[in-house]
Amino acid sequence: MRYAGFWLRFCAAIIDGIVVNIIGIIAGFAIGLSIGIIVGDAETAQALAGVLGSIAGIVIAWLYCSFMDSSPKQATLGKQALGIKVTNLDGKPISFFNATGRHFAKYLSILILLIGYIMAAFTSKRQALHDMVAGTLVLKN
């Protein structure tokens, strides 16, 4: 197996961040516009849109990562662009449930000052903390 290194994964994450943010901006605009029309009061609408927009952002990121990583391509758009994919420890595709666990385990990596991500540069299988938690690998195609 050829493991994907830190910088390759980092670049894929940047591409995915751009994709998720574009989707989030469109969804946020639609949510804000809808709430503004329904509520009418600008101050209430703005506060409600902020809360719902944040929730939508979390849901969009989760569904994007989990559906894409558990798809037949085994990769998000960023990973596909760089020729890498997510597998289980045997090199086989992961389930949506496993991809969901991997996605939310990324919050652990974030909570410890991104050290969980940096671990991918130093582990033998190039696994970040969320890969270890979910039992996944990121491989070069």
Image: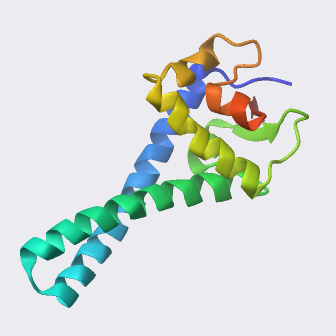
| Residue 35 position by quadrant | bottom left
Q: Is residue 64 visible?
A: yes
Q: Is residue 40 above or below residue 89?
A: below
User: Residue 74 versus residue 122: which sits nearer the camera?
Assistant: 122
Quadrant of the frame with the C terminus: top right
Q: Relative to residue 138, is residue 52 drawn left or right?
A: left
Q: Relative to residue 45, is residue 124 drawn left or right?
A: right
Residue 32 location, x and y as percent? 24, 74
| Residue 123 position by quadrant | top right
Q: Residue furthest right?
A: 90
Q: Residue at x 73, y 40 (%)?
A: 85
Q: Residue at x 40, y 58 (%)?
A: 57
Q: Residue at x 70, y 32 (%)?
A: 133
Q: Is residue 75 visible?
A: no
Q: Is residue 26 above or below residue 37?
A: above
User: Residue 80 versus residue 131: which sits nearer the camera?
Assistant: 131
Q: Is residue 100 above or below residue 137?
A: below
Residue 91 location, x and y as percent? 87, 36
Residue 114 location, x and y as percent? 47, 24
Q: Residue at x 21, y 89 (%)?
A: 38
Quadrant of the frame with the N terminus: top right
**How was the colour assigned to the protein in this rendering?**
rainbow
Residue 63 location, x and y as percent? 58, 60
User: Residue 18 versus residue 45: which sits nearer the camera?
Assistant: 45
